[in-house]
């Protein structure tokens, strides 16, 4: 869900009088080679958060409506309201996004942080669906494109 532009796009657009406003970065994190040190740090951070009443748990896909609308939407809108170009999600927009993402979400990689039972943050990690679709020239997953 991150935008990608070819390197020459910047110059092409500047030739038409436009100028860059900001940079947007995306990162690929290879998980096959997670170091022992990073795993120990993650465990230490989680233990420290618990001492402050903060718990991190996996998203519950069986209760995705509540997880999305009542927890994630509020946190998202409040966290991003000061950012450049931000427009808050409406309930309908968040519902639409939730329904689309539900098919891709792996609860092992989707988290909600809570302090005393109140949501204060969330994080989701999505697979790069483009790696699947790039091999599918017809654009249809069914009947055999999904494989």
Image (cartoon, rainbow, N blue to C red):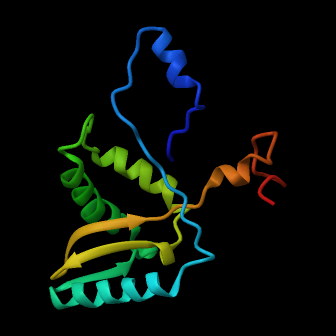
Q: As displayed, is residue 72 above or below residue 117?
A: above
- Name the spot of residue 78 as percent of width and height, x first: 18, 53
Q: Position of residue 79 (x, y in %)?
A: 21, 54
Q: Residue furthest right?
A: 144
Q: Count the marks.
A: 0
The structure residue drawn at horizontal position 28% and vertical position 91%, both measured from the top left corner, is: 47
**Image location (x, y in percent) of residue 111:** 38, 73
Q: Is residue 33 left or right of residue 48?
A: right
Where is residue 57 drawn, in percent x and y? Answer: 35, 81
Q: Nearest the camera: 85 or 27?
A: 27
**Is residue 70 toward the left or the right of residue 134 in the image?**
left
Q: Is residue 85 left or right of residue 20?
A: left
Q: Quadrant of the C terminus?
A: bottom right
The single residue placed furthest to the top in the displayed view is 16
Q: Nearer the viewer, residue 50 or 31?
A: 31
Vertical side of 88 occupied by 57: above or below: below
Residue 51 position (above or below residue 124): below
Q: Can you tell which quarter of the image residue 128 is in?
A: bottom right
For image coordinates 72% across by 48% down, the residue present is 133
Residue 131 sits above or below residue 119 on the image: above
- The residue that appears at 51% across and 47% down in the rendered structure is 1
Picture quarter containing residue 68? bottom left
Q: Nearer the viewer, residue 41 or 103?
A: 41
Q: Using the image as rendered, state which of residue 24 and residue 94 is in the foreground.
A: 24
Dividing the picture into quarters, in which one does residue 20 lie? top left
The residue positioned 50% from the left and 45% from the top of the image is 2
């Amino acid at each position: 869900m991150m935008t990608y532009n070819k390197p020459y796009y910047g110059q092409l657009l500047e030739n038409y009088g436009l100028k860059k406003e900001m940079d947007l970065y995306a990162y690929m994190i290879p998980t096959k080679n997670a170091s022992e040190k990073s795993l120990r740090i993650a465990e230490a951070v989680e233990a420290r958060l618990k001492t402050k009443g903060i718990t991190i748990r996996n998203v519950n896909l069986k209760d995705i409506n509540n997880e999305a609308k009542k927890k994630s939407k509020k946190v998202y809108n409040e966290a991003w309201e000061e950012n450049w170009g931000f427009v808050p999600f409406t309930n309908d927009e968040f519902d639409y996004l939730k329904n689309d993402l539900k098919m891709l979400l792996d609860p092992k990689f989707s988290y909600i942080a809570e302090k005393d039972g109140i949501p204060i943050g969330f994080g989701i990690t999505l697979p790069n669906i483009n790696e699947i679709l790039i091999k599918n020239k017809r654009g249809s997953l069914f009947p055999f494109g999904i494989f």
